[in-house]
Amino acid sequence: MTYAREQQTSQPARTGRVRAIVRRYPTTTFFLLAFSVTWAVWVPNVLAPDSVAGTLAPFWTYGPATAAVIVAALTGTLRDLGSRLVRWRVGWQWYAVVLLGPAAFYAALAALHAVFGWSGELDQPNAFRSGLIALLPLFLALVLTDGLGEETGWRGFALPRMLERTGPMPPSLVLGVIWALWHLPLFWTAGRPLYGEPFVIMLIELPAMSVLYTWLFQHTAGSALLAVIFHGSLSMFAVSATTQADTVRSALIILALKWALAGAVGLYWMRRSRTADVVTQRSQRGA
């Protein structure tokens, strides 16, 4: 009887301690949980492709979203996460950016190949291979799987908290590296697009993409919905240096273009920061 009473008393105490740790380290907890939930299926799939893990793995893209919901619930921020996923009033021009930007990037890359007469052909993006009838269903599928499954966590939960501590560039780069590492088991998973590809390319590519996501996030009032749509659009139209470059030169060009865009965003952030410092100094002198 005493033992049972002690068990009933200790259970809430343990729950309270776990909740306190999660509330103190929400971002770290999220990352650990996102990797754990995802890799719990992806790693066994590498070792035993014919197992249950192999059946689940292709649909197991919701690890970051699951982790975000759990940690948000434990920290009392579930409403904030939900509001970011339905934040659609951001200006029509940003929908144009997320829907047409990846297509414009592919067009620019194709134009460079044609103008300079480079050998080899770029792989056609999913939008070209799917056909007109399947275009919208494929886009919605990508938005509701990879887009929603990943961006609910990366940009819906992690990024806002990381931006509270410092300027936008460091958290963008760190999140990009973590985002790349999350994909790591797929490089050893037979039958997946990343199988056998050099991981180092993604490790270079995604930090640049993360900078662009942060720029979008800041200009859309912290909307995770636009990040979700952007992810789906990128999967439809854009080319990746990791999976869709037919030569080393193509991979380097893709990386260079993406880092050029990220560099432009970085310069914008530096200029804005300096302007803010000047305004602050002037206001202090006036006071």
Image (tube, rainbow, N blue to C red):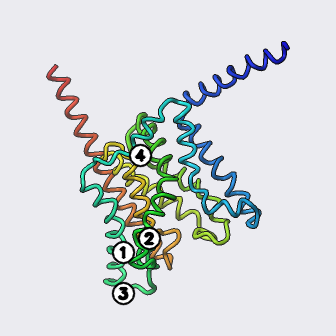
Closest to the camera, between mark 3 and mark 2, is 2
For image coordinates 74% across by 60% down, the residue present is 52
Amino acid at dot 4: Leu
Mark 3 vs mark 2, CA separation in Å: 19 Å
The residue under label 1 is: 109
Amino acid at dot 1: Leu
Looking at marks 2 and 4 on the same chain, the residue that comes earlier in the sequence is marked by 4
Amino acid at dot 3: Gly
Closest to the camera, between mark 2 and mark 4, is 4
The residue under label 4 is: 85
Looking at marks 3 and 4 on the same chain, the residue that comes earlier in the sequence is marked by 4
Q: How many marks?
A: 4
- Find numbered disc 4 in the image and state the secondary structure of the residue it sits on: helix
The residue under label 2 is: 239
Amino acid at dot 2: Val
CB within 8 Å, label 1 to label 2: yes
Relative to 150, residue 15 above or below: above
The residue under label 3 is: 117
Sort mark 4 into few (<14), some (14-19) or many (20+) by Cα contacts within 10 Å: many
Mark 1 vs mark 2, CA separation in Å: 9 Å
The image shows residue 107 at horizontal and vertical percentages of: 33, 75
Relative to 265, residue 164 above or below: above
